[in-house]
Amino acid sequence: HITLEESGPTLVKPTQTLTLTCTFSGFSLSTSGVGVGWIRQPPGKDLEWLALIFWDNDERCNASLKSRLSITKDTSRNQVVLTMTNMDPLDTATYYCAHTSLYGSSGWYVLDYWGQGALVTVSS
Amino acid sequence: VLTQSPGTLSLSPGERATLSCRASQTVSATHLAWYQQKPGQAPRLLIYAASNRAAGIPDRFSGRGFGTDFTLTISRLEPEDFAVYYCQHYGRSLLITFGGGTRVDIK
């Protein structure tokens, strides 16, 4: 049974750095083909993919945010950490982490398990 | 870029819903998925590889398409189907793009 849970501050000030932790169970990030991604959603708006990290330390980031994002994993603790620098009120959003793996008959990746999300507000 | 239309679809329970997702360039159907999101909840995977239902998804949900045009169809809307639907491209380079979503509202 796969579960993921996001944790971190609910409020950050502009220009500060946000650090969010995704703690998961039911899978290992040392298993081939497995990864964890981060996605955010501003209130009332659409989903925006942020970053991915895979079992082999391969990383992918949204090009528009790449200079501000960092994603790391701690396999022994079953955690993935997302860091976003220079936070702005426009970064106010619910931040989700999600499990990704090769899925079903397609042999390609999906985001098949999601955490419940963590709302982060950026305000002075 | 993935463009979804319409932005909002107002239908009654029992009606058929047809949602469109258009890519700005040809994408592999294998890399195209659909998600459902209800208020206050995380998205849920519905369809993967354009036309395959994810585990536990009822057969009233179906997907089709290739190239740049993809469609999600809900054959007969149930009360629990009123939600926002997103298409997603998970490309060969492992970069992800979401469409802007279609809201299916109760008429």
Image (cartoon, grey):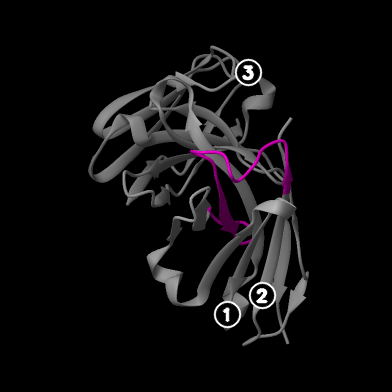
The reply to whether callout 1 and callout 2 are in contact (CB within 8 Å) is yes
Q: Main secondary structure of the magenta part?
A: loop
Q: Quadrant of residue A73?
A: bottom right
Q: Nearer the viewer, residue B80 or A1?
A: A1
- Report helix, strand or loop for mark 2: strand
Q: Quadrant of residue B29?
A: top left
Q: Residue at x 66, y 75 (%)?
A: A18
Name the amino acid, label 1. Thr
Task: First in sequence, mark 1 or 2: give its number.
Answer: 2
Quick one: label 3, few (<14), some, or many (20+) residues within 10 Å?
few
What chain does badge 2 belong to? Answer: A
Check the picture and name the quadrant holding the C terminus of chain B.
top right
Q: Residue at x 62, y 56 (%)?
A: A44
Q: Nearer the viewer, residue A108 or A114?
A: A108
Quick one: label 1, few (<14), some, or many (20+) residues within 10 Å?
some
Report the residue marked by disc 1. A85
Range drawn in magenta: A24-47
Residue B2, how many percent across, how many down?
35, 47
Give the spatial CA distance, label 3 vs label 2: 36 Å
Same chain, labels 3 and 2: no
Q: Residue at x 43, y 19 (%)?
A: A105
Give the spatial CA distance, label 1 vs label 2: 6 Å
Residue A101 is covered by the magenta coloring: no
Report the residue marked by disc 2. A18
Name the amino acid, label 2. Leu
Report the residue marked by disc 3. B56
Residue A76, how many percent across, how many down?
71, 52
Residue B24, how many percent across, how many down?
24, 48
Name above or below for residue B21 compared with residue A44. above
Q: Nearer the viewer, residue B66 or B93?
A: B93
Name the amino acid, label 3. Gly
